[in-house]
Amino acid sequence: MAAPIAVAIDAPDIETAARWASEVAPHVSTVKVGLELYLRYGPEVVGTLRGGNKTSVFLDLKLHDIPATVAGAARNLARLKPSILTVHAAGGREMISAAVEAAPQTTIAAVTLLTSLDDAALADVGITGPSADAARRLAVLAVESGARALVCSPNEVASLRAEVGPEVTLITPGVRPAGADHGDQARVATPEAAYEAGADLLVIGRPITRAADPGAAAASIAAALRRAEAASA
Ligand code: C5P
């Protein structure tokens, strides 16, 4: 069975993106398309990455606007049948419910706080106090508004799970196999640690896509997750 991994297809062009997607497709459940690729190629990129593969497409477009606009955007995106679509929890209750209602077949995942913002940067935009508290507050607000998934750092998985219960899908970027280059990710966990903490879907980009053989890198992480699953069963 394909491992619960969403490979971040952050490629410079659609040809490279299509190649990465087909190489990893036998091993992972999902491929993730972000703003960079979507804004260059539009809806076409979704079909190209799905190709003949059975992988789900996760549209990481982090919508954030007034509720009517987000509803319209989510309705249009729902036609592409993404399995997951992201919105910013900071858009508020009405905006999140508007997305949920407009795309009933898609899991709406809320991003709590961007991990690129440190405490000083958060204070600049008016969010004071411990960032973990703000992230928890936004997570609860998002789930109460109908979001069925949250994007969070591997370090937050255990505390958010306690807050939102077992039914909410927790999606974690910042995953690095032991010994891999951290790149620009500050807070990282190994795939096994993220999985053991209770993450449901691991977002992994460069450790797979920048490997000499992306298919082999995906297969190796998928095997490590299966071992972790067997050990905890
Ligand atoms: O290459 P890497 O494994 O760091 O890719 C992580 C992916 O997850 C990127 O597409 C990045 O935009 C995304 N992401 C993240 N941190 C968040 C939310 C999304 O790294 N808080």
Image (tube, grey):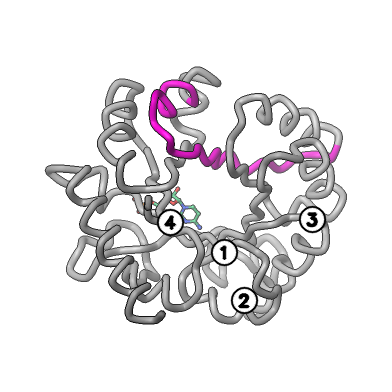
Residue 220 to residue 42: above or below: below
What residue did someone put label 2 on? 161
Residue at 49% across / 39% down in the picture?
56
Q: Residues within 10 Å of mark 1 (few under 14, many from 20)?
A: many
Residue at mark 1 to residue at mark 3: CA–CA distance? 14 Å
Q: Residue furthest left?
A: 212
Residue 137 location (% of width, % of height): 74, 72
- Dot 4 beta carbon under 8 Å from ligand 1: no
Q: Secondary structure at mark 2?
A: helix
Left/right placement of residue 182 relative to residue 149 reads left
Badge 4 element? strand
Mark 1 in CB contact with mark 2 (< 8 angstroms): yes
Q: Earlier in the sequence, mark 1 or mark 2?
A: 2
For the residues labelled 3 and 4, the Cα–Cα distance comes to 22 Å
Q: Residue 91's x, y, as percent?
A: 76, 50
The residue under label 3 is 146
Q: CA distance from mark 4 to mark 1?
A: 11 Å
Question: Which comes before the other along the chain, label 1 or label 3?
Answer: 3
What's the mark number on residue 4?
4
In front: 88, or 198? 198
Label 1–label 3 contact, CB within 8 A: no
Residue at label 1? 170
Q: Earlier in the sequence, mark 3 or mark 2?
A: 3
Task: Name the amino acid type tagged 4.
Answer: Pro
> Mark 4 or mark 2, which is nearer the start of the sequence?
4
Q: Which residues are magenta?
A: 46-67
